[in-house]
Image (tube, helix red, strand yellow):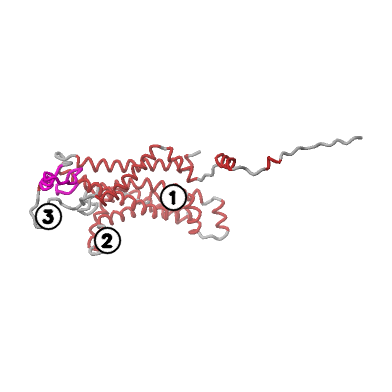
Amino acid sequence: MKKKFFTFHVDLDMFNPASAKDKEYMVQMRPSSTFFKDGVKRLYKNKVAFVSFIVIIFITLSSIIVPMFWPYTYEDQLGVQAGKAVDASYNNLKPFEYGKSEQELIDEGESVFPHIFGTDAAGRDYFIRVIYGTRVSLAVGFFASIIVLVIGTLIGSISGYFGGKVDLVIMRFVDIIYSLPDMLMVILLSTVLKMTLSPVIEGTALESIGANIISLFIVFALLYWVSMSRLIRGQILSLREQEYVLSARATGAKGGWIIRKHLIPNCISVVIISAALQIPSAIFTESYLSFLGLGVNAPMPSLGSLASEALNGLSSYPYRLVIPAVVISLIVLSLNLFGDGLRDAFDPKLNN
C-alpha cells in the first residue's frame, strides 16, 4: 500500500512584527477609555451644557482678572478727595459720562478711563462694583456648596452604611429640618447670628470677611445639607450589599475605611453632580439675603445688595437694577444647565 504524504506551505511573512502603521491602526480600532473620559465626551456633545460651562469660566475669570488692572475700586468715591470739597458731579453719572474734573482733563487733551456703567449715588464706579459683586456671589456659592457637600456626604454615608437605630435617628432629624420653612429660618438665623458674631469677631482676622458672610455659611451648614445627605444615603444603601463590600467586611475592615475606600468613590459622580446643582441655590440665597440687607457688609458689594440699592433711583436709573439682575440670572441659569449636563453625562443610570 502506498502512503500518502501531505505538504503544508507556511508563509513566514505572516509572523513578521507589525509595522508602526499597523500598530497605529490597531490603536485606532481599540481605543482605551474610562468612565471619566466617556462622561467628558458626552458632556462635550451636549452643546447647551458646554456653552454654559464656557460662560461660567468667562464670568469667573472676569471677576478675578478685571479688578487687577481696572483704574477704579469698588469703594472709592470719585468726587471725594482729601482736603477738597465734595464734587457732586461724579454722583449718578450715566454710562460713559464724566465728572467735572474729568471733563476738564479731557478738554485739555488728556485721556480718562470711561465709566462703562456710570457711577452710583455715592460716586463709585458701577462697573467695578458689579464685578466685585459677581466675585462675592460666586465665592459664597462655591464655598457654601463645599460646606454642604462635606456635611451631607459625611452624615449621609454614616446613616446609609450603619443603618438601624443610627439611620432612624439621623433620618428623623433630617425630617425635622425639612419641615421647617426655609426662607423664614434663613432670615431668622442670619439676623440672630449677625448680632451674635459681630462683637465676637471684632478686631480679629474674620472681621474683614464680615459677620453677615460668616452667618450665611453657618446657615448653610445648619439647613442645606439635608438634601445631599438623603441622596448619599440612598446611594450607600444600594452599594453596601455589593460583593466587594462584603469581602472587605470579611477581612476585618472597619466601617470608616469601607466608606472612604469603597462606597464614596463609587458614588462620586452623584456627589459632584449634586454639588454643581447646589452652587446656584447658594448664590440665589446669598443674593436675596443681600437684597434684604442681611448679606455682605458695606461698602463691599454683592449682586443682591446692588439690586437693592438700585431701587432708590429706579425711575431715573433703571439699568442699575437690570445689570445685576441679568448677571444673577445668567450665573444661575448657566450653573443649572451645566449641572443638568453633568447629570446626563455622568449618571450611569441615564446612559445605556
Q: Callout 1: helix, strand or loop?
A: helix
Dominant secondary-structure state across the stretch colored magenta:
loop
Does the magenta segment cover residue 335?
Answer: no
The residue positioned 16% from the left and 40% from the top of the image is 317
Circle 1 crowding by C-alpha within 10 Å: few under 14, some 14–19, many from 20: many
Q: Callout 3: helix, strand or loop?
A: loop
* Of 272 and 62, the residue lying toward us: 62
Q: Callout 2: helix, strand or loop?
A: helix
Percent coordinates x, y for residue 60 in the rendering: 32, 47
What amino acid type should be assigned to the residue bearing mark 1?
A: Ile
Classify residue 134 as left or right of residue 107: right
The residue positioned 48% from the left and 52% from the top of the image is 265
Q: Which marked residue is nearer to the observer: mark 1 or mark 3? A: 3
Name the residue carrying label 1.
Answer: 232
Q: Between disc 3 and disc 2, whose residue precedes?
A: 3
* Of 227 and 102, the residue lying toward us: 102
What amino acid type should be assigned to the residue bearing mark 3?
A: Gln
Q: Give the range drawn in magenta.
A: 97-125
Q: Are marks 1 and 2 in contact (CB under 8 Å)?
A: no
Q: Do the residues labelled 3 and 2 touch (CB within 8 Å)?
A: no
Percent coordinates x, y for residue 347 in the rendering: 46, 43
Name the residue carrying label 3.
Answer: 81
Name the residue carrying label 2.
Answer: 206
